[in-house]
C-alpha cells in the first residue's frame, strides 16, 4: 500500500502568504470604493476559529458588534466593529483563505466591509437579543432560535448589500 504524501509545509505557507498579500493589496481600494476610508480597519489572520470566537478582540462593549454567524458551517472571515469609534477589525481564518480564488476573496472583503457599513443597525440586533435574554421572557431554546433567525437574516441582508456593491463596481 502506498502512502499519500502530504503537501510540503512551505507550499501551504506560500499559498497562505499569497492570499494574505492579495487581501492586503485589494482592501484599501475596496475601503475607498465603499466609502469606508474614514474608518480605521485592521486585518488579522488566525489559524483556528476557536481562538477568535472566544478570545480575540475586545469583550463586547457598548458599540461593539461581532458578525460571525456560524450556522454549523465553516467561515472565511468575520468582522468586529466599534462603530461609535469608527474602528473595525477583520479576522481571517487561515485554513479557509488558502482554498479560495481571488474572486471569492474579493467577494469576502466586500461582504465583511458591508458588515461595517451596517454595524450600527446590527448593534441594535445584538442589544435587543441581550435585552430579551436578560428579561427572562423566553426560554434559552427560544432565545437561541430567535438569535439564529435574526442572524440568518442579517447575513442575508449583508450579502445583498455586498452583491449590490460588487455589481455596481462591475465585478
Image (cartoon, helix red, strand yellow):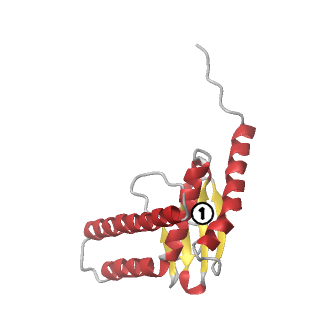
Which residue appears farthest toward the top when viewing the image? 1
The quarter of the rendered structure image containing the C terminus is bottom right
Mark 1 crowdedness (10 Å alpha carbons): few <14, some 14-19, many ≥20 = many
Q: How far across and how far down the image is residue 82, in percent?
A: 56, 80
Q: Residue at x 68, y 48 (%)?
A: 16
Element at label 1:
strand
Q: Is residue 146 above or below residue 25?
A: below
Q: How far across and how far down the image is residue 57, in percent?
A: 60, 71
Q: How far across and how far down the image is residue 1, in percent?
A: 58, 13
Q: Quadrant of residue 134?
A: bottom left
Please tell me how many numbered marks the rendered image carries.
1
Q: Residue at x 71, y 34 (%)?
A: 8
Q: Residue at x 55, y 86 (%)?
A: 84
Which residue does the numbered mark 1 point to in the structure image? 91
Towards the viewer: 11 or 61: 11
Relative horizontal placement of residue 7, taking residue 68 as reference (left or right): right
Amino acid at each position: 500500500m502506498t502512502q499519500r504524501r502530504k503537501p510540503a509545509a512551505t507550499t501551504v505557507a506560500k499559498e497562505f502568504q499569497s492570499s494574505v498579500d492579495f487581501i492586503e493589496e485589494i482592501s484599501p481600494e475596496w475601503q475607498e470604493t465603499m466609502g469606508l476610508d474614514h474608518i480605521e480597519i485592521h486585518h488579522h489572520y488566525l489559524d483556528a476559529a476557536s481562538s477568535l470566537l472566544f478570545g480575540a478582540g475586545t469583550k463586547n462593549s457598548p458599540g461593539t458588534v461581532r458578525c460571525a454567524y456560524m450556522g454549523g458551517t465553516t467561515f472565511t472571515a468575520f468582522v468586529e466593529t466599534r462603530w461609535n469609534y469608527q474602528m473595525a477589525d477583520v479576522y481571517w481564518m487561515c485554513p479557509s483563505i488558502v482554498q479560495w480564488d481571488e474572486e471569492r476573496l474579493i467577494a469576502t472583503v466586500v461582504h465583511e466591509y458591508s458588515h461595517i457599513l451596517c454595524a450600527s443597525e446590527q448593534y441594535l440586533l445584538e442589544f435587543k437579543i441581550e435585552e430579551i435574554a436578560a428579561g427572562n421572557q423566553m426560554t434559552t431554546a427560544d432565545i437561541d432560535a430567535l438569535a439564529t433567525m435574526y442572524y440568518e437574516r442579517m447575513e442575508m441582508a449583508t450579502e445583498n448589500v455586498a452583491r449590490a456593491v460588487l455589481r455596481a463596481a462591475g465585478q
